[in-house]
Image (cartoon, helix red, strand yellow):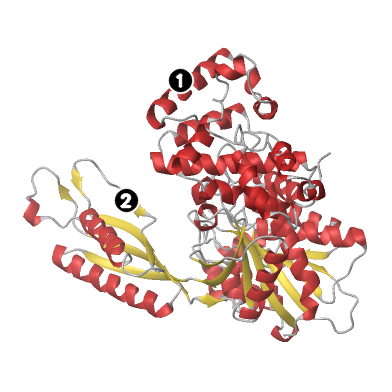
Amino acid sequence: MTTLHELNSCDAATFIDRLRGIYEHSPWIPERAAVQRPFANETALKLALQSVVSAATLDEQLGLIRAHPELAGKAAVAGQLTAESTSEQAKSGLHLCSAEEFAVLHQLNADYNAKFGFPFILAVKGPTGQGLTRQAVIAAFKRRLKNQRADEIAECLRQIKRIAEIRLNDLLSVQLEFGPAIMQWSEELAAWSDDDSGPLTCAYMTPAHRQTAAQILEWMRAAGMDAHIDAVGNVAGVYRSDALNAKTLMTGSHYDTVRNGGKYDGRLGILLPIALVRHLHQRGEKLPFHFEIVAFAEEEGVRFKSTFLGSTAVTGHFDLSLLDQTDADGVSMRDALLAAGHDVTRISAIARNPADLLGFVEVHIEQGPVLLERDLALGVVTAIAGSSRYLVDLTGLASHAGTTPMTMRKDAAAAAAEIVLLVEQRCAQAPSLVGTVGQLQVPGGSVNVIPGACKLSLDIRAADDAVRVAAVKDVLDGIAAICARRQVEVSLQQIVDAKAAPCAPRLMQQFGDAIERAGLPRYDLLSGAGHDAMAMAAVTDVAMLFTRCGNGGISHNPLETMTADDADIAARVLLDFLRQYNHHEK
């Protein structure tokens, strides 16, 4: 077995030889990394090798990509792969392809090479290291064949770095203590969906939502926590301290999802700290404060169009009038809660006393490409962008598409199209400002009828509230002008007005210190997405730790992904943060 100590102490030639199989047929990578020895830990070694690849010339990078074999290609059939590649392709069962699968892969390889001029690279052992299915490999192949060449070069290099990470783990016999469990639990929760046959959807108080809560409760109790489900469906677990008059440090995130969502959005911030509590409990190790994990029941606003229901209950800011909101089937929130066995009269009792809290920290997948593009597993969030959301109803005049002159139309859809472009144009004027029309409908539309009605959503976000408010004003003024000119009536309903939430510098510093102790560089970034930490900021200091999001940073999508290695190092950083926290007074 090779050890890090041996790699640090051997001569350069031996170092290069020991790492020869990590990057396919590319000994120049360990050769250039050797000068950076000694490495403090395996993470530092991985980063050093990755930095060599990133700093290489384009020709060197293309040479590295071309050094890799095709998946289930001629070299595999002829038995000419390296031992590492042979093992990896076998892990995904590529050596067991049916004749049809082999033909599909053969054609994909040919099409890909013709378009890009290099072979398709995929870490076929996948996010967990246990191997992708052949179906998943083929789906990734087809999806990436649509990319632009520059994007695909970058993605191939990321996949190569992931392959190298797995190979280095094998070489050094690295055992991930937390990552595999977190990934496995995520898979188990993803099996419960409102749509049994489709991608993951878990809306508030559906059967799948209640099953998810029950499973989280079971895991919390098994980990050594006092846990219960409260009156809004939050699953709250406390790992109690033995310290006299101990206060509480809170963490957690949401377990509901968007429609056709990802497995890690929200849930990572629940499962990761449960894994840590299980570890502490097994060791008999207590913290100098109570550590509370809250799996917030609702954050996304999918069913009742109201966000942060779980975290606003914890802060004491739950709006009881929302209980009369109804879903698409006419079921009120009150009735949904009662049907699930919850006592709505107990909602006000959920509120925590701010005087008892040390802070709230949330671990969350980034939901964007910033960390991915910088080859960083973790980042410290500086602030969470404020958000303004509206539902917009446009009413024009439905009339015959063939007999109504263009100059006499009151076309609601045309007004909506102009509004979409207005949002795009106005929200491109500031670096941290974004605007989205995510819903667009023509109710009762017909191919030969001018749309008489249109419904759309509006979402405007920025880290600076003044920037956001100014953009909202301009967009709303623009909507009014567009509708007046087109003789279309407009009705606006604001459904979210959330202020930006800056993270507490003292907590950010402690996260940054823990990241650096783990062998990673600290990197600070803004969160454009809203999170439960925004609501928690009303009662205590907050901070967030982001983990890298794969597949180009895609989230709110079944393609959302991360690796067991990233989950593991995030867990180790949070554990170090918890152990060191008692050295920092509030």
| Residue under numbered circle 1 | 107
Q: Amino acid at mark 1?
A: Gln
Closer to the camera in the image, 550 or 301: 550
Closer to the camera in the image, 329 or 318: 318
Q: Are marks 2 and 1 in contact (CB under 8 Å)?
A: no
| Quarter of the figure with the N terminus | top right
- Give the side of residue 511 with respect to residue 530, left or right: right
Disc marking residue 443: 2
| Quarter of the figure with the C terminus | bottom right
Closer to the camera in the image, 218 or 282: 282
Q: Position of residue 540 (x, y in %)?
A: 65, 81
Q: Position of residue 260 (x, y in %)?
A: 52, 46
Q: Amino acid at mark 2?
A: Pro
Q: Position of residue 458 (x, y in %)?
A: 37, 63
Instruction: Bin the neighbour count of mark 2 within 10 Å (Cα to Cα): few under 14, some 14-19, many 20 and up.
Output: few
Q: Residue at x 74, y 38 (%)?
A: 18
Relative to 273, say whether 541 is above or below: below
Relative to 400, say whether 414 is above or below: below
Q: Position of residue 76 (x, y in %)?
A: 61, 19
